[in-house]
Image: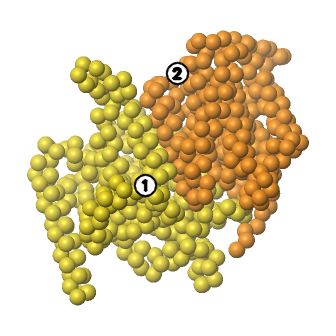
Chain colours: A orange, B yellow
Amino acid sequence: MSLTTFLQQCLTGISLGGAYALIAIGYTLVYGILRLINFAHGDIFMMAGYFMIFAMASFPWYISIPVVLLVTVLLGVSIERVAYRPLRTAPRMSVMISAIGVSYLLQNLATYLFTALPKGYPEIPFLKKIYQIGGLSASFVTFLTPVLTLIIVYGLIILINKTKIGMAMRAVAKDYDTAALMGIKINRIITFTFAIGSLLAAVGSVLYFTDRMTVFPFSGSLPGLKCFVAAVFGGIGSIPGAVIGGFILGLGETALVAMGYSTFSDAFTFVLLIIILLIKPTGLFGEKTTDKV
Amino acid sequence: MKKNAVSKNKLYTLAALLVIIVLLAFLQANSAQYSYQISILERSAIYAVVAVSMNLLTGFTGLFSLGQAGFMAIGAYTVAILTIPVDSRASVYYVNGISPAIANLHCPYWLALIIAGILAAALAALIGIPVLRLKSDYLAIATLGFSEIIRAVIAAPQLDRITNGSYGLKSIPGFPNLFIAFGLPALCILLMVLLINSSYGRAFKALREDEVAAQAMGLNLFRYKELAFIISSFFTGVGGGLLAIFMRSIDSKTFSINLTYDILLIVVLGGIGSITGSVIGSFLVTAGREWLRFFDNPLVIGGFVVPLFRSGFRMVIFSILLMMVVLFYRRGIMGSNEFSWEGLGRLIRSIPSRIKRKSKAQKHPAGIPLCPESMDDSKKGDNA
C-alpha cells in the first residue's frame, strides 16, 4: 500500500470517526445522567437523515440545516418526555426495554412513512466539493468533519465545566437525589441533556449521510450500537473519552475495510467492546467506582 | 379437601391436553386447508421455547442477556447442515461448492437438534467466562455484541463452503407431522419448568433477588450464572434449530438484532418471570402480527379511502401497542405469576365486579416493579 493510499484511508477513517464521536457524545451524556443506554439514539440519528431529505426538498441548505437540527432536538426531547420520564422511578431494566421499544417504533414508523427502500440523501454543494492536497483528494465534508467535531467538543466541555447549567448537569450525574435537594430541577436538566445529545446526533447525521448518500429505516441501528461501544470504550460519562473512542472505531473500521475484511468490520466494534470491558471495565477515561452493599 | 382440589386440577389439565391433541389431530387431517393457521401456531410454539429460555435468564436469574439471535443462528445452521439431504446438497451449495468435511455428514433431525443445543451451550460456556463478570446493561450490550459477531462470522466469505455465505441454506426437511412440531417445543419448555422448580431454580432466584446475600449463603455466583447461561443457550440453540426446520430455508439476515428484540418483547408482554406468560406472549405476539395485517391493506368505507391504511401501518400499530404495555402495564400479562386453574377461576369470577369497578372509579396504575430488585439500583459503577 502506497503512502498516499494509506493517508487517504486515514482521512476517511478520521472523518467517519468524527461522525461517530458526535453520536457517541449523545450516548455518554445520557448514560452519565440517567444510567440508560438510549437505544433510540441511533434511530434519532436516522430520522434526522430523513428530515434533511424533506427539508432540502423545499428549502436551500442554509435554512434546511437549522430546521433539521431543531426538529431533531424536538424529537429527542419528546421521546424523553413520553417514553422515559414516566419510568423515572421504575427499575432500570424497564427503562432500557422502553428504549428498545422506542427504537423499534421509530424504525417501523420510518418504514411506514418513507418505505424500506433507501432514499437518496440530498447533496449540499459546498460539502461535496472535491479538494486536493498533494496526492490526496477528498470532498470538503471529509476535512470538515474532524475539525467541526473538535470545535463542538471544545464548546461542550466549556459548557459543562464553566457554566451554571453544566455544573447542574455534573451534579445530577454525580448524585440524583442530592442534586434535587440542592434545588436543581432534575427534569429540566435531563431535557437539556437530551436536547444536546439530539443536536449532536443531527449534526453527525448531516456529516455521515453526506458521505453515505442514502438513508433507509435501519441505517441508524448499527451506527447507533457502534457509537455506544465508542462511548463505553472511552469511559462512559466522559466526553473526551467518547471522542477518542469514536475516532478509534472509525479508523479501525476503515482499516479493516481497506484490508479486505469488510464483513468483519461490524464485528470489530464488538471485539473492541469485549476487550475493553475485560481489561478496563470503566473504559479509557472512566472513573473508578466501587459497589456498595 | 386439599387432595380433592389437586386431583380436580389434574383432571382439568388432562382435559386441556386432550383438547389440544384432538385439535392437533384435526389440523393434521386438514393441514392443506389450514396451512396458514398452522404455520402461525408453529412459529409461536418455537418462539415460546426461545422466550422461555430468555426468561430463564432475565426473569429467573436476573441476567439481562441480548444474545438470543446469535445462539439461535448457531442452532439453525447446525441443524440445517446436518439434515439437508445429501443428494440435494450439490444444488444448495451450487455457488461455492461444499466443504468435504461436511459433505456426507447427515443425521436425523432429533439428533441434529440435540447437537445444535450442545454447540450453542458450548459456545455459551466459552463466552460466559468473560462476559458474566459484567452486570446489567454492560452484560446486555456485550451479549448483543457476541450475537452480532456470530452473525458476521456465519456470513463471512471465508466460511462460504460451510454456511453458503449470503445465499443461505435451503431444502431443510420440515417437520414430519404436527405432533412433533408442537411436541418438541412443549418438551423443551417442560424441561425448563422442571429445572426452575428444582434446587437449581431456587439458586437462580436467590441470585436474582440479591447477589451479595446469595453469595453469603454459600452460593457460588459464577457457577450458577454460568449454568443458567449455558442451559438457556442450549434451549435457545434448540429453538433456532426448530426455527430452521420450520422455515426450511435460512440465511444470516434472519438472525439479526431484531430477532432478539422480538423475543424480548414477547417476554416483556408475557411478564418477566412467568413461564406461562412467555408462552401466552409468544402466541399473542406472533398471531397479533397476523391479525393486524388488515391495517396493511387499503380500507374503504363507503367509497372513502381511509388514508392511513397502507403497507407498514401494521408494524407501527404493533410497536405503539408494545410501548403502551411497557409504559402503562409494566407487569405484562402474567406479571411473575404462573397459570393455574384456580387463578383462571378467580379471574372469571372477578370479571363482573371488575367491570363495575371500572365504570365507577379511575384505574390506578400498577406499582409493582417489572423486574428483579437487584437491577433497580441507581448506584454508579455497575460494571466494576
Q: Is residue B258 visible in this depiction of the protein?
A: yes
- The span from disc 1 to disc 2 (Cα, nearest Å) is 46 Å
Query: Residue sitting at 75 percent across and 56 percent down?
Result: A180
- Measuring from the top left, give residue B113's x and y in whole percent: 35, 59
A108 vs B114: above or below: above
- Measuring from the top left, give residue B307's x and y in whole percent: 36, 23
Callout 2: few (<14), some (14-19), or many (20+) C-alpha neighbours within 10 Å? Answer: some
B253 vs B197: above or below: above
| Quadrant in the picture for the N terminus of chain B | bottom left
Q: Is residue B53 visible in this depiction of the protein?
A: no
Type of residue at label 2?
Lys
Please state which of residues A144 and A60 is positioned toward the viewer in this rendering.
A60
Question: Residue B168 falls in which quadrant of the image?
Answer: top left
Callouts 1 and 2 on one subunit: no
Left or right: B55, with A293 as reference point = left
Nearer the camera: disc 1 or disc 2:
1
- The residue labelled by disc 2 is A119
Type of residue at label 1?
Gln
Callout 1: few (<14), some (14-19), or many (20+) C-alpha neighbours within 10 Å? Answer: few
- The residue labelled by disc 1 is B362
Query: Residue sitting at 63 percent across and 12 percent down?
Result: A59
Please state which of residues B128 and A108 is positioned toward the viewer in this rendering.
A108
Left or right: A240, with B140 as reference point = right
Query: Residue sitting at 51 percent across and 78 percent down?
Result: B203
Q: Which mark is residue B325?
A: none
Q: Secondary structure at mark 2?
A: strand
Callout 1: residue from which chain?
Answer: B
Query: Residue sitting at 66 percent across and 11 percent down?
Result: A60
- Measuring from the top left, give residue A237's x and y in whole percent: 75, 50
Judged from this view, the residue extending furthest toward the front is: B360
